[in-house]
Amino acid sequence: MSITIEIPSLPVAQLRAMSLISNPTPSFDELSSVVEADPALTAALLRAANSAASAPVDRVRTSRIAMVRIGASETRRIVMSIALSSSFGSLQDSGLDEAELWRHLIATAVLAEATTLGEVRHSEAFTAGLLHDIGRLAMAAQDPARYAKVVEMARRGIPATEGERLVFGMNHAQWGESIGRAWDFPSEIVDAIAEHHVGAQHGLSWIVARAREVAATLGIGDGLLPPTPPDPDSEALMLPIIAELGGEEAVIDRVEWYSGSFAA
């Protein structure tokens, strides 16, 4: 059974924040104009800047000081993360573990950035990792009751992409590709969204696919099922990503730092 794709429409504040996807090196003023237009972004940056991981001496009370403390790159990533999370409704009735799904997205982003090869930019890899399951977010938010059927099927052993095809007429990678094109994401990121489950991966798509596998070795699931260890012959297991990031605890701490900015 197929249904018509409904591309989510974005409020002005989210639309401005999402524009950073195509701008990997925004100026301080560009970031500030986006942040100051949205109280949720200001609150997220203050949480990040005042967290123990940021080692604050005095509490930060303004978004501009928070941006200086955590830096432009981290500000951009938090802004994109919050914009993405606020672009969809609650996933509560979808059967997904929403907190775990977000840990999966952030872990994939962090690990993808550390896996960059060749001409792929670090900022581009982080963004692709963060956005790769945007189709799943949209499906679950748009029709949570229907997505709950996919979750039930996955827990009975039917691959989620197959369950999505049976229930929705397409899988979340295809749905995400349509959203990425409609929202005018860079073509490399759209390709990574579309290809993160297929075999013929290359460039950014390969990086995101490998980062997803490495995230599973850290005990991070995808919001549907507990993590599944990669195949012993997986290329992901030959990548020294976790060691290069300081070990498992350091990676988890970094994921939790980003996740902490989402807290209400």
Image (cartoon, grey):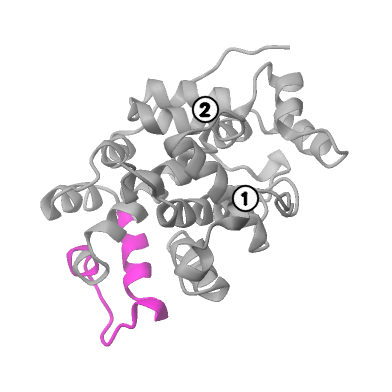
Mark 1 burial class by Cα count in 10 Å: few <14, some 14-19, many 20+: many
Q: Identify whether 105 is placed above or below 9.
A: below
- For marks 2 and 1, give the CA distance: 17 Å
N-terminal-most mark, 2 or 1: 2
Left or right of 22: which side holds 245?
right
Left or right of 87: which side holds 237?
right
Residue 220 point in image, percent of width and height: 65, 58
Q: Mark 2 or 1, which is nearer the eye?
A: 1
- What quarter of the picture does the N terminus occupy? top right
**Residue 99 in sight in this render:** no
Disc sitting over residue 213 in the figure:
1
Magenta-colored span:
39-66
Left or right of 264: which side holds 209?
right
Q: Would you name the residue on which mark 2 appears?
A: 194
Quadrant of the image occupied by residue 59: bottom left
Q: Is residue 51 magenta?
A: yes
The residue that appears at 75% across and 26% down in the rendered structure is 162
Say what amino acid the circle numbered 1 marks.
Answer: Glu
The residue that appears at 29% across and 40% down in the rendered structure is 13
Q: Identify whether 154 is placed above or below 239.
A: above
Under tag 2, what secondary structure?
A: helix
Residue in front for this viewpoint, 50 or 226: 226
Quadrant of the image occupied by residue 170: top right
Identify the residue at the far right of this view. Answer: 156
Label 2 with label 1: CB-CB less than 8 Å? no
